[in-house]
Image (spheres, rainbow, N blue to C red):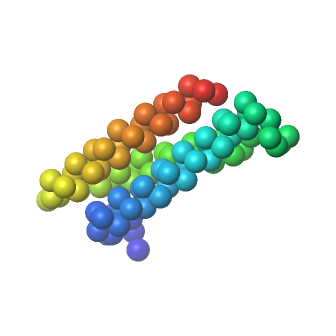
C-alpha cells in the first residue's frame, strides 16, 4: 500500500514517531559527545537520527499537501513541520 493512500491521522502519527525517535537518537549522540559515557563513534547514530527526522518531516509535508483536510489536521501538520524543521536545523548545526 502506498503512503499516499493512508489517512492523514495515521501519517501524522507515523511522522511523530519517526521524528521523536530521530530527535532522541541525535540527542543521545550529542550528549555522549559531551559526557563521553560510551567510547564509540557517534557519527552513524547521528546520521540515522537525522534521516529519521527527514522522514518524519516529509510525512508531515505529505499530509499538508493533501486536499480537503480538516483545520485540526492541517494545524497539527504545520506544527509538526515547524518542530521537526527546527530540530533538524539544530542538530545539523551542532555537527
Most foreground residue, 48 or 67: 48
Most foreground residue, 76 or 5: 76
Q: Residue at x 15, y 53 (%)?
A: 71
Total marks drawn?
0
Quarter the N terminus occupies: bottom left
Q: Residue at x 41, y 49 (%)?
A: 58
The image shows residue 22 at horizontal and vertical percentages of 55, 48
Q: Residue furthest bottom?
A: 1
Quarter the C terminus occupies: top right
The image shows residue 57 at horizontal and vertical percentages of 42, 46
Any part of residue 65 in sight: no
- Quarter location, residue 7: bottom left
Q: Residue at x 15, y 58 (%)?
A: 70
Q: Is residue 5 left or right of residue 87?
A: left
Q: Residue furthest right?
A: 39
The image shows residue 60 at horizontal and vertical percentages of 35, 51
Any part of residue 58 in sight: yes
Q: Is residue 9 left or right of residue 16?
A: left
Q: Residue at x 75, y 33 (%)?
A: 35
Position of 4 relative to 36 (above/below): below
Q: Is residue 59 left or right of residue 18?
A: left
- Quarter location, residue 31: top right
Amino acid at each position: 500500500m502506498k503512503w499516499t493512500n493512508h489517512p492523514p491521522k495515521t501519517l501524522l502519527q507515523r511522522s511523530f514517531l519517526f521524528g521523536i525517535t530521530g530527535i532522541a537518537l541525535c540527542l543521545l549522540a550529542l550528549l555522549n559527545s559531551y559526557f563521553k559515557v560510551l567510547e564509540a563513534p557517534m557519527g552513524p547514530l547521528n546520521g540515522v537520527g537525522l534521516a529519521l527526522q527527514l522522514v518524519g518531516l516529509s510525512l508531515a509535508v505529505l499530509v499538508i499537501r493533501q486536499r480537503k483536510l480538516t483545520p485540526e489536521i492541517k494545524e497539527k501538520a504545520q506544527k509538526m513541520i515547524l518542530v521537526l524543521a527546527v530540530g533538524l536545523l539544530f542538530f545539523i548545526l551542532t555537527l
